Amino acid sequence: MFAEKLILRIPGPTPIPPRVQQAMNRPMIGHRSGQFSALFAKVAERLKPYFGTRQDVYILAGSGTSALEMSVVNTVGAGDEVAVLVSGAFGERFAKICERYDIVAHRLNVPWGEAVTADLLSAFLDEHPNVKAVFATYCETSTGVQNPVKELAAVVRAKTDALFIVDAVSCLGAVPCEMDAWGIDIVVTGSQKAFMLPTGLAFLAASERAWNVIENRKPLAFYLDLKAYRKSLAEQTTPYTPAVSLIFGLEEVCNMLEEEGLANIIKRHELMRDMTRAAMTALGIPLMTSDEYGAPTVTSLDPKGAFDSEELRKTLRTKHNVIVAGGQQHLKGKIFRIGHMGFCDPLDVITVVSAIEMSLAQIGVDVPLGEGVKKAQEVLIHHV
Ligand SMILES: Cc1ncc(COP(=O)(O)O)c(C=O)c1O
């Protein structure tokens, strides 16, 4: 098998488009040069449509978690109460970050595979009227749930003065996000998912309401001090050494995203979700999420013991050079997850479905070969 033809279908890091890879190979330039500043200011501006904001987008060197932590340490402090909507591993991460700083995190837990609904949040806020912030996950990558953040934002706005802070690491750039119009205060994301880059950049945008809070607080961390990033961005730069090569790549990503257009990108991801869900259903593999809340970027499957997910993943990897993700935490070894975001198109979905069918047959599962592919094809041809 060709190592270069590894078919990476995990929910991040995602494959890098060749032209983005090439852009990152450019020779290094001085990070305090006019050349870098011009590039940096432009890409920061070009990210705004994916957040749906007129506010500035801050770019820092760090994985997605650094931006999650940034959103915490600049807005709340020890002893403050916050609500954390936990629908899986990444909601739980937000709660753990808060607790590391002695912030009182009230968890609204829903079973993994389910979404946090507006009604649940409304009742939860009645129980916890003093929260200063509400933390939510847009796409919960560990389960493939897309939480209804637009409706959740409306509840927060209607019921409290709390900031509404959203982790959109595994979906921004692939799904609608209207931060300003929906009333979200902070949106954070990372580079290695729908933005088709390696890990290493994190992005954050904050509303005016959020800035009113941030400007009047002493942040709990040094590197993640948002005020420092704001001051630097006004001078078209970053407070600390930026990841210059990734910024070269980001410029090319912006070119690609603009060439396709956000509306088409969103449609492509919805199509890939629908193809994947239809194919897996045709193969009799239970989906972990309902149609209403299934994410356009990642689909989780729970064979419920009908076959061994890890044996399937091993066969996909060793016989077909296809990588899909396993489960996290208590779902480790039980479920598998197919990433379909970023540099991924409908024919890539057909490929992964076909590889899953073959691998299932190879591990002795009585699978109707071709049925999943057929369903995915039908969804595709009815779409175009
Ligand atoms: C929804 C979500 N939030 C946060 C993270 C953490 O990002 P990172 O691993 O880049 O720190 C991830 C990573 O998979 C994620 O999917």
Image (cartoon, rainbow, N blue to C red):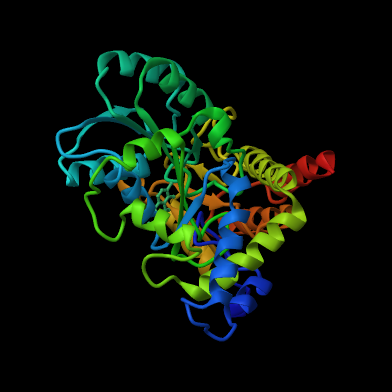
Q: Is residue 45 found left or right of 92 in the rendered image? A: right
Q: Nearer the viewer, residue 153 or 10?
A: 153
Q: Quadrant of residue 101?
A: top left
Q: Which of 56 and 369 is in front in this view?
A: 56
Q: Is residue 243 above or below residue 73?
A: below
Q: Is residue 182 above or below residue 89?
A: above
Q: Which residue occupies 71% across, 45% down? A: 371
Q: Nearer the viewer, residue 108 or 322?
A: 108
Q: Can residue 102 be seen in this view?
A: yes
Q: Is residue 113 found left or right of 195 in the rendered image? A: left
Measured from the top left, where is residue 364 in percent x and y? 53, 55
- Quadrant assignment for the N terminus: bottom right
Q: In this view, does 193 lie above or below 110?
A: below
Q: In which quarter of the image is residue 20?
A: bottom right
Q: Nearer the viewer, residue 188 or 376?
A: 188
Q: Is residue 227 above or below residue 291?
A: below
Measured from the top left, where is residue 226 in percent x and y? 35, 52
Measured from the top left, where is residue 192 in percent x and y? 50, 60
Measured from the top left, where is residue 97 in percent x and y? 25, 46
Q: Can residue 319 be seen in this view?
A: no
Q: Which residue occupies 58% across, 82% down? A: 25
